[in-house]
Image: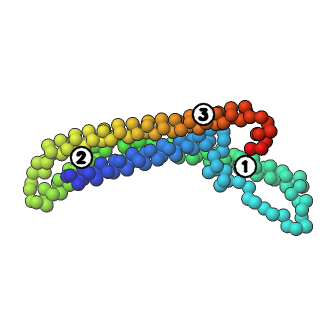
Amino acid sequence: FVELYSESLTSYRGLQTALQRTMTTLSKFGLASSNNTVPSVVQNHMKLPPHQLVQGAAGADDKEVVSMAKAAAVKDIAAAHATTTAYLATLYLAQVDECRARVNVATCSDTFAKTLNEYGNRIITSAGDADLTQWEACITLIKAAFTLDLQSLKYEFTTRLERDADSREAKANAVATANTDAEMLDATKPIAEIIKD
């Protein structure tokens, strides 16, 4: 039982790490796509292909029919950018939801208890005993301890997320302050010095 207990705790920590990664991905994508901005991951994959005009056909791209076709293609790509951005936002949100469901303490505890029951029944049956219920009281106590450990890990995880968010915010504030200080320093310089720099 001890080995299963340890493996299950390790698995739970892995699920928490996956949740943190998916939350970070969603957050970064949300920032990248804010204010109707097309994220670079979308823009870099969906654009007009590069082309080179054949020597002697230099004026072909200036023709009205080509300009209209290019405008239509750009419009279609812009629409594709919007739908692809919406798709990725939905996908990243679904990943977070899936990971959140997998770190549900009650579900993980129930799954762990079921695993212990199956393991205990297999051992009892292999040993030739008929009473498959002899480990139930022990499994109930182990499940309660496991649930407490998962709750503790959940609180540690939440605290770590908040600390990380506070750290990122402090760094962003420090950068903003440094930029403001640099701008103010530049504002006090004579124009000749700014031009030299």
Q: Which mark is residue 76?
A: 1
Q: Name the residue under label 3.
A: 177
Percent x, y for residue 12? 34, 47
Earlier sequence position, callout 2 versus callout 3: 2
Percent x, y for residue 42? 63, 50
Is 96 in front, or is 167?
A: 167
Between the residue at mark 1 and the residue at mark 3, the CA separation in whole angstroms equals 41 Å
Q: Is residue 178 above or below residue 41?
A: above
Q: What residue type is labelled 2?
A: Ala
Is 86 in front, or is 105?
A: 105
Q: Name the residue under label 2.
A: 113
Earlier sequence position, callout 2 versus callout 1: 1
> Residue drawn at (75%, 47%), measured in percent from left and top?
75
Q: In this image, 15 relative to 175: left or right? A: left
Q: Quadrant of residue 174?
A: top right
Can residue 123 be seen?
A: yes
